[in-house]
Image (tube, coloured by chain):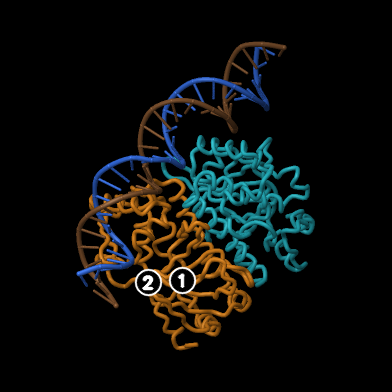
Chain colours: A cyan, B orange, C blue, D brown
DNA sequence: CGACGTGTTGATCTCTCTCAATTAGAGTGG
DNA sequence: CCACTCTAATTGAGAGAGATCAACACGTCG
């Protein structure tokens, strides 16, 4: 339990996140059990796992997913630093989705009672949890709109834009150098409900049109307006300056 | 503001819902502003609406949806009595999805500060809100798995089963008489990411196989096991005896 | 009785999937 | 340094699930 670390949590410096009060930080710190690391590709939480812990993603990328019995996998959403994991399952309930590390990741682990403790000891933090949860749902809503109604080109455009802004908000370097983009085409495909082959062809097509480039795990957007139009994205939902507050 | 009504709230008698304490009920009552009714087909909350109120669905069915600029509509999930609406948008934020009444509906309307008041005045209720929100997300997750990975037949089977159990849990009459099923085929199609025509053909096919029947706005399941297998549904997630607690 | 909403069905069309093969890059071992 | 292996990206070709287009049936309602 590294108290110092909580105060110095690197996420707190990012402008996306509003700052918490000293008391709130202290409370969170007291509930933190430690840090857990996983290698890229590791299964963090298994589908149906009973005793899955409560995590906040401190560094790295991951994703939530569900699978059908024959192996078909749907990636529900991507998790970036600051995202909360494990809220879906209550005490003694099984996780309804798996979580897999996309890069090497560091999680802050919390006691199983943290959710309740936070509500009980700090209404503000409890409110934040509700808000974080609702905010994640709106990401999933947008994703559902993509998969249900957008064609391949629109889906990919929407994903690129959304992830670009989410990633950009979490990095300090200028976006001209691109943003982190650690997923391979199979993972993009699984998140969009497309086949690997069709994902590749569509991705290439957009790239040939000069809208973007993906290279060495980094994403460069050359024409955000065109992508935004191609994706038919309405508001600013889900990305941009959010009101997320880090839990650590 | 009908205080009596809260104590006598019909939803409280349903076994799906755990009972709240007298204090909790009183608290909720004090925050309730009144009831709002809409006709079937009415737009309850518009996409992008700024001042959307906070509702609990008291009677009737509704659905949340998002649309693309050319009119393509995705139904995100169906709302049944006891479901909470409007949590996604925080103060001064615009709603990111619309809500439409499927039948004549009655909502309990709450003050805009209710979310915060509930957290502040009753950690238990605050915790419940978080749980309700997370629970709704798990419904959306399951829906995303359907749209992303299941074929038409599997999607429809999954929807029929899920809605059957959700509806059954909210009615007192035996399920042999079927459950309420107020959506038309266009709405089913829009929720599953399928075209109207293909939805119709698939629905008919399953019906010819003797798995179910839809008649006069009621759903009868004749072969739950076959449907469950066809849908490749894993656990009990989302339906069955939930831990939802009514807010009113 | 005609208009309208909803359901039903047949006939094409096409977007996306599946199958298959090739290329490119990163290790790894000899 | 080169052969060998493995993973990820790429590209072509054929197949198919589901979309689109077009009629028609049926009940309700003013």
Q: Earlier in the sequence, mark 2 or mark 1?
A: 1
Tell me the CA gap for discs 2 and 1: 11 Å
* Residue ID for mark 2: B103
Of the two numbered discs 2 and 1 in the rendering, the one whose residue sits closer to the viewer: 1
Q: Residue B228: in sight, yes or no? A: no
Which residue is located at x 69 percent, y 42 percent?
Answer: A220
In the image shown, does B215 or D30 lie closer to the viewer?
A: D30
Position of residue B94 measured from the top left corner of the image (x, y, whole percent) = 60, 68
Q: Residue A82: in sight, yes or no? A: yes
Label 1, residues with CA under 10 Å away: few <14, some 14-19, many ≥20: some
- Left or right of A186? Residue B120 is right
How many marks are shown on the rendered structure? 2
- Secondary element type, mark 2: loop
Which residue is located at x 69 percent, y 53 percent?
Answer: A34
- Secondary element type, mark 1: strand
Quadrant for residue A178, please give it.
top right
Label 2, residues with CA under 10 Å away: few <14, some 14-19, many ≥20: some
**Mark 2 belongs to which subunit?**
B
In the image shown, does A108 or D18 lie closer to the viewer?
A: D18
Residues at marks 2 and 1 touching, judged by CB atoms closer than 8 Å: no
Which residue is located at x 53 percent, y 41 percent?
Answer: A189
**Mark 1 belongs to which subunit?**
B
Position of residue A13 measured from the top left corner of the image (x, y, whole percent) = 78, 57
Q: Is residue A60 above or below residue B126?
A: above
Q: Is residue A125 above or below residue B11?
A: above
In the image shown, does B54 or B200 lie closer to the viewer?
A: B200
Position of residue B135 measured from the top left corner of the image (x, y, whole percent) = 50, 62
Q: Is residue A25 above or below residue A101?
A: below
Asked if badges 2 and 1 are on one and the same chain, I answer: yes
* Residue ID for mark 1: B43
């Amino acid at each position: 339990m590294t108290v110092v670390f909580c105060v110095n949590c690197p996420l707190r410096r990012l402008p996306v996140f509003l700052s918490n009060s000293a008391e709130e930080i202290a409370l969170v710190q007291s509930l933190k059990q430690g840090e857990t690391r996983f290698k890229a590709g590791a299964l963090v939480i298994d589908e149906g796992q009973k005793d899955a812990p409560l995590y906040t993603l401190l560094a790295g990328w991951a994703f939530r997913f569900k699978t059908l019995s024959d192996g078909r996998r749907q990636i529900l959403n991507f998790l970036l630093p600051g995202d909360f994991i494990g809220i879906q399952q209550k005490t003694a309930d099984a996780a309804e989705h798996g979580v897999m590390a996309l890069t090497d990741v560091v999680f802050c682990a919390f006691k199983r009672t943290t959710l309740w403790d936070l509500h009980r000891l700090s209404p503000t933090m409890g409110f934040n949890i509700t808000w974080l949860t609702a905010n994640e749902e709106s990401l999933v809503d947008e994703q559902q709109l993509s998969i249900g109604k957008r064609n391949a080109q629109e889906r990919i455009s929407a994903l690129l834009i959304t992830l670009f802004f989410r990633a950009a908000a979490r990095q300090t370097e200028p976006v001209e150098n691109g943003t982190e983009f650690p997923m391979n085409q199979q993972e993009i495909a699984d998140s969009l409900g497309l086949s690997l082959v069709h994902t590749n062809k569509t991705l290439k097509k957009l790239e040939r049109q000069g809208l973007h480039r993906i290279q060495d795990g980094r994403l460069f957007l050359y024409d955000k307006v065109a992508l935004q139009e191609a994706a038919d994205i309405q508001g600013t939902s889900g990305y941009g300056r959010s009101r997320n507050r880090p839990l650590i």
